[in-house]
Structure formats: C-alpha cells, structure tokens
Amino acid sequence: MSAVKSVPPNQSAVKKSWSDALKSFSDIRVMIMLFLGFSAGVPILLVFSSLSLWLSEAGLETGVITMFGWAGLGYSFKFIWAPLIDSMPLPFLTKWLGRRRAWMFMSQLMILVAIFTMASVNPVAENVLWVMALGAVLLGFSSATQDIVVDSYRIELAGFELQPTLSSVYVAGYRIGMIVAGAGALYLASYFGSSEELYNYEAWRNTYYTMMGVMSVGLLTTFAIYEPAAQSLEIYKQKRNLKIFSIYAAFLLIPGVIYGLPVFVSTFATRVLSRPLTLIPIEYLPAINMYFLMVMACAPFLLIFFILNQPKIVNKIDSVVQSRDDNIRILFLFILSVFAFIGAFVFIGKIFQAPDDSVFLKFLIEVVRLLGSVAVAMVVGYALISVGLAKKEVAKRLWVEPIADFFRRYGKQAILLLLLIGFYRVSDIVAGNLSNVFYAKMGFTKIQIADAVKFLGLFMTIAGGFLGGLVAQKMKMMHVMLIGAIASSTTNLLFILLTYHPGDMNYMYLAVVVDNLAAGFATAVFIAFLSSLTSV
C-alpha cells in the first residue's frame, strides 16, 4: 500500500473502461473512505445548524446564537496546525496504531468528549453557557483535526489512479453524515419531545447522546482499518479485522440501500410530487427497525474485538522529525500564537465597526480584521522564536518548508494553481450562502425549501459525486476539472429562469436537481485534484 506521490495537474490516471471504473468502487479502500467520510460529516452540523436550532428553541437571543458560529472557525484555519498533526507523535498511540490512526482516534475521542460536554449543559441554566461554548469550540477544533487526518489517510491509502473514486465516496459518506446530524438530529429532538413552542432540554440532551453513539462508527472504522505507511508484523490479524469489518459493513449497507431506495422514492413522490406512495408496508417497519438496532448493538462488541486484535506494526515513515523537547516547545509556540490571533481578532473587531447599511464596507473590515489577526499571530510567533521558545529551523521545517516545496515542484504554475484552487468553487459558495434567502424571496415556504434543498438536493449532490469519480477515471484531471467548473457555474443560470416563474415548484426542482448534481460532481473532482497536488 504505497503512498501516493504528487503528480503534474494535467496528468490522468491510466484510462479505464467503464466497467473497470465501476469495479473500482468494490475496492475495500473505497468502503473504508465511505465510513471515514461519514464520521467526518457528523460533527460539523452539531456545531452549526443543529446547535443553532437547539439554542433558538431554548430562547437565547440571536446575537448569542450567532456567537456560537465562531466555534467552527477551526475549519477555516486547520491548515495552521496540520503540520503539527503531521509531525508530532502521540505517546503510546503512534507506536500502537501508527501515525495517522493515532491522531484519528484522538480526534474522535475529543469529539465524543465535546458532544458529551455540550449535551450535559442546559443552555437556559444560569452561568453555564460558557461550558457549552467550551464544548462547541472543542467540537469544532477536534472535528477539523479529524478532517486533517482523514485527508492525509486518504492520500496515503492509494495511488493517483484511485483518488477520484476515494474522493467521490468520501463526499458521499460526508453528506450522509451531515444528513444524520442535521435532519436526523432534528427528527430525534422532535421525537424526544422538544419543539419551538415547548422547549425540552432532555430531548436535546438525548439527541446529542445519540449522536455520540453514531460517532462510534468512526471509532469502529479506525480500529478495523490499517496504517498505509506502516508494515504489519501480524498480517493475519490485519486481514481478519478487514474481513470482519467488511462483513459488518455488508450487513449494514446492503439492507440499508435496499430499504433506503424505496423510502427515498416514496418520500419523493409523497412530499415532492404530492402523490402519496407507500412501497414498504407499515407493518414491516418494526421488524426493519429491530434489525438495524441489532446490527448497531453489535458495534461496541466489534470495537472491543478490534482493539484487542490490533496487529503489531513498524512505521515506515518516522513521524518524529524533531526531539520530544522540540515538540513541546513548538506546541507552546502554536498555543500562544493562537491566543494572540484570538486577542487581535476581538480587539480589531471592537475598534472597526461598519454601519449596518454598508455591506461592502463590512466585507472590507472583516478582511482587514482577519489579515490583521493573522499578521499579529505571525509577529508574536516570530518574536517567541527569537527569544528562544522554539528552534527557528524546526518552525521553518513545519510551516515554511511545505509552502516552499509546493513552489519548487510547480514553479511558475504554482500561482496559477493557487488561483484555481481559490476561485474554483466561488460561484457555488457565494450562491449557496444566499440560496435560502433567494428561495424565500421567490415565494417558497420553509417546508418547500427543505423538501427541495435538504432532501432532494443532498441526494443529487451524492449522485454527482459518484458521477465525478467515474468520469475522472476516464479523462485527464484538468479536462474533468474544466467540465466541473463549467457545469457548476452555468447551472447557476437556472436560478435566473426561476425568477421568471416565482413560486413554481417544477422550476425550483429543476434548478435544485441540476445545480446540486453539478456541485457534487465538481466537489468530488476538486478533492481528487487537490490530492494529486499533495506531496506526502
């Protein structure tokens, strides 16, 4: 299982037939990425939309709820501590599980602690909101850390030829995790007895405890899989774990697909087309639910088995690039620089405030605020290095050398590649942030928006991801990137068509289906493209 090497951005994988491209989805590594994608997709909405609704039902002010959105700031700045994750070993865990899986386990453990902390606090109680805020920040940080490790694991797991497939399945798993943590969490909170009219803390607490159980899927996967950049001294244990994991996944996925497709068709016909349709008799539902409960109940026992059955490994890549003392010093340097960034961010925000009616000025101030905070953190970090807190050559190797390596490998193309990365999805990102407001202006109700965007749109995104993974195996990467860019930008023109038919659900479904299909395609291809640029 050799690590993938960086390749020129216009390189294509060996051309495959359509049957070979489809067969690539049967690789065990594809299933691994599906489950890791699911584990990565669950926490993000527990920080954002699901948490916002919880706090809203609890009666908190909009300003307070908005402040909790800063807990997800770690997703935007995870590149800053990614070098630490890449180089610093974890005591005992790195030798036992390997460099990637050790950090994967640690991040998942922190996610569980964060969710438990948030669930244990009733936000309406006096003087305890800071505990929930602390849990939310920890959840955002640990979830972003898991993303870093899973991305690293995916890149090392297979060569360039399989990266499009791994990326598309990862996106699918991620979206499914978001559905579970988004719509699933809202459904559970309602089932347990909380609503906008009657807030019930126990309902939300039990919902978040249930999400902790859902995250056990990630833990199970981490202990079942292998470390790609390590040599197993007990290969029979590694093969046994993967075989048992494959069987368990089959018991979960195959019935899930067989059950999920009729449910999707029925829901689509009933809610979207307004044509009542029942493909699965109601009397079968208790037995189906019992089956899935029994399968999920097996997870803790399998987890214990995988923990006890870990093969002994020898890490091929030495993760200790500096001494233990250097690791501790560089960690303190990072923590102090983060505090400097936070302090500068708050301070600049208090000094510069734009009037509410000036959107452009607000944008400029936020840019200055962000860049100014980064500059302060860099100055503080440099000053701490100058006074001897950490060695200059170690900091350079961690944060400067990777950037220099990128420019050495791609030369004059590096700037063009960075511009491509920065602007590739800009049309979808800008339109996505305003889409719900646009739909409301067009006269659609919240239920109609939810049915189209949250239900049908998510499934189309998953389908687009699979399509992107298939096509990327047949064409050069830059050609597929071009298709994705054209598709994701031109499909936004459908929303112009919608302005001529406000309130018409047929035109809305057309816009949502085509746009999300293109967005899923472009996302999967984009992740594969980024993987191809990455140096191990």
Image (cartoon, rainbow, N blue to C red):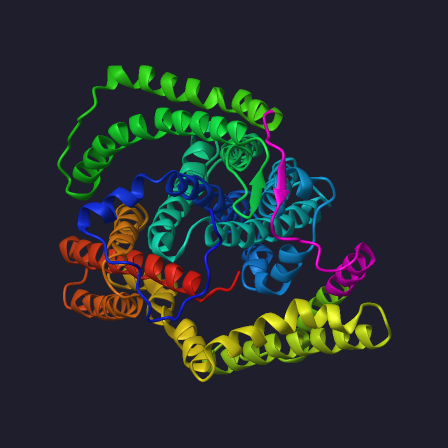
The location of residue 135, given as percent across then percent down, is 65, 46
Image position of 147 with respect to 298: above or below: below
Examine the rendering and report whether any part of residue 329 can be seen: yes
Q: Residue at x 74, y 61 (%)?
A: 335
Image position of 66 with respect to 111: above or below: below
Examine the rendering and report whether any part of residue 122 can be seen: no
Of residue 13 and residue 453, the one placed in the foreground of this image is 13
The answer to whether residue 9 is magenta is: no
Which residue is outermost to the bottom?
412
Of residue 258 and residue 271, the one placed in the foreground of this image is 258
Q: Residue at x 13, y 36 (%)?
A: 275
**Magenta highlight range:** 309-335
The answer to whether residue 318 is magenta is: yes
The location of residue 388, given as percent across then percent down, is 86, 72
Count the numbered circles shown: 0
Residue 38 occupies which quadrant of the picture? top left
Image position of 364 with respect to 405: above or below: below
The location of residue 535, given as percent across then percent down, is 51, 64
Of residue 211 and residue 144, the one placed in the foreground of this image is 144
The location of residue 506, given as percent across then percent down, is 14, 54
Residue 68 occupies which quadrant of the picture? bottom right
Q: Residue at x 62, y 65 (%)?
A: 80
